[in-house]
Image (cartoon, grey):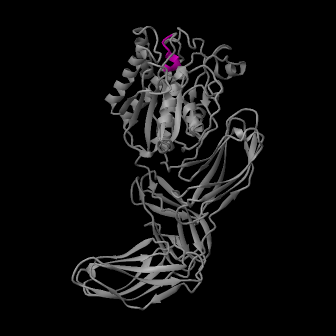
Amino acid sequence: MRRSNVIRRGVLAAVAVSALVLSGAPAPAAVQTGVAAPATLTSPDLSLSNVKAHLDQFQTIANNNGGNRSSRSTGYTGSVNYVYDRLTAAGFTVVKQPCTSGCTSGSGPNVIADWPGGDPDQVIMLGAHLDGVSAGPGINDNASGSATILEIALTLAAQNPTMLKHVRFGWWTDEEQGLNGSDFYVDQLPAAERAKIQAYYNFDMVGSINGGYFINRITSEAGQVLKAYYDSIGVETEENYEGAGRSDDASFNAAGIETSGVAAGASYRKTAEQVAKWGGTQSAFDPCYHASCDTTGNISDTILDRAGDAATYALWTTAVAGDPADVVVADSGDQSSAVGVAVSLNTSASGGTAPYSWSTSGLPAGLSIDASTGQITGTPTTAGTSTVTVTAIDSASPPRSGSATFTWAVYPTSGGCSDSNNTDVAIPDNSSVESTIVISGCAGNASATSAVEVHIVHTYIGDLVVNLVAPDGTTYLLHNRTGSGTDNIDQTYTVNLAGEAANGAWKLRVQDAASVDTGHINSWALDLGGGTVPPDCGATNDTDVTIPDLSTAESSVTVSGCTGNASATSTVEVHIVHTFRGDLVVHLVAPDGSTYLLRNGGGGSADNLDETYTVDLSNETRNGTWKLRVQDTTRRDTGYINSWTLDPASGG
């Protein structure tokens, strides 16, 4: 870890996890997740002896290269090669990344390793600086962090579990000269690649011989993952104030990436209260900090072992899939329908032992589930939005179960939303034609069971491609060259048009896609099911949420019953009471965990934040839980979230 400098940087929380079962320890309290996780998962017990074997190798490398592993030394080159060779042999994609700007002249490269698999748009990253100071071999600072994440990487490769998210590791150069290697890595990443990193966990000085148990940004969601592990083994933890802004997590934090990490303390003195809690003496956490005595003898096995297990738990919890034998109910997605219109929804499950028995809670009135098949049928009788949970129980002994939860919006209906066009339209060979119906005076959206009645005279309907075109240009395929040489189409199609406004010009588009046979559109009729009242897609939370010093606070709103994606001109109205708004970094967090920076400090000592931001949310579905995440990045001034409003449909 480098010496202290005051750095003011922002943070973005993007990752959360679910509580899972630890090896040899009770499961920690649940932490929210943006990705559905199986019910159980065992994280490995990281081998302390293997981690210490890596430390021995780093000590030997230092001994053979002038006694140190500083970033410009042959000792650092040897350290890079040691890490690179083991990762490559284990099956990682490994890059030695030269630091071409910002690093001390002559500094060696970063080492970046990617494990194949997992969602490439959701990345969990672990990192540690690989260099030390010139005064000594740098075993606690920071061979301890480097060895820990190296052994985690090798354990991941050996077990080769199914990955939910993509995993990346980084070993940083030139940290002791100013976080230069990690700064370079983050700065050269395109914005889209930065956005994929949902959490970065940093490990710097994790085996201090008189150490404590510190977590970087302990109140963040990523920090709560690490805390959950320590809680499960009965070890109290504290915020890592000594390390704030002094290690490589600061580089990621400044770029708006959620960060946390583990440390055991450096030159600060352990207090009497900390001695009572953790043992040791009222002296420096690491008496050999940046000194020649920072050797393999300067390590606490207990603290190092626990740090490794906490780091492994964080990785397995956030990125690794669970036991495939567990029952997993498929996500049906949020549903919408209309009063008086019959519905049918097929649910499904995997894992466990089939067959399953099915049950639900929260179904709209008029609907029920078949306990044997999981099919939900019926006719809704009452308008409103319900939270539905579908549960499947398998046939094993003892039985296992899984659940999925979604919303079901039922809209009222009104009459008069149908019309027809009886004017013949010729369909020439190898051409496309259209016939139009204009709907007006029909409230809200079309029905999920809209009907399109089509009558086409043609001597070879295998030539025809028929689409319904909504007023916004969206197309719905009705007929795609089936029927071969059969004459004419006389058919009524049921189409889910719940995402379309009822009013406007609807078109029947018919293409003749082959030569010889021709015909004409004789007539067609459109019945939009009476129309449905579109929901109000905006939401407000006016409950005060305190923003403590140097902490992150969140306030949530839930949008349900809306269809489709949010608008490119969505708005976020924010009201924050704070005595120094220049301290504040504010993000909007979408239901899928994507983050949108609204404010990144600035404003100096002005009080309060009252602002409406326009945000392009066109890649996000409207429904789900949205969060306003506010971080106070500097000491002294505090405040609270007073209220905020999200309108994901503005301008849409």
Estimate the x, y position of residue 543 in percent, counting from the top left. 74, 53
Q: Is residue 247 magenta?
A: no
Q: Percent position (x, y) of residue 360?
A: 54, 64
Image vertical order of residue 333 relative to residue 529, above or below: above
The residue located at (22%, 83%) in the rendering is: 485
Q: For the N terminus, which image quadrant?
A: top right
Can residue 522 be seen? Answer: yes
**Nearer the observer, 174 or 171:** 174
- Determine which quarter of the picture holds residue 550: top right
Question: Would you say 550 lies left or right of 472 here?
Answer: right
In which quadrant of the rendered image does the C terminus lie?
Answer: bottom right
Instruction: Tell me, yes or no, if residue 234 can be seen here.
Output: no
Rendered position, 366 above or below 231: below
Q: Nearer the viewer, residue 93 or 224?
A: 93
Question: Which one is nearer the viewer's eye here, 179 or 345?
Answer: 179
Between residues 308 and 329, which one lies in front from this camera angle?
Answer: 308
Q: Is 241 situated left or right of 517 in this image?
A: right
Position of 128 compared to 606: left or right?
left
Q: Which residue is drawn at 59% across and 80% down?
A: 413
Image: 288 above or below 149 = above
Magenta stretch, residue numbers: 136-142
Residue at horizontal 50%, vertical 35%? 187
Total numbered circles: 0
Residue 390 in the image: above or below residue 139: below
- Magenta span contains residue 140: yes
Q: In this view, does 54 lie to the left or right of 339?
A: left
Measuring from the top left, give residue 405's x and y in whole percent.
Answer: 54, 59
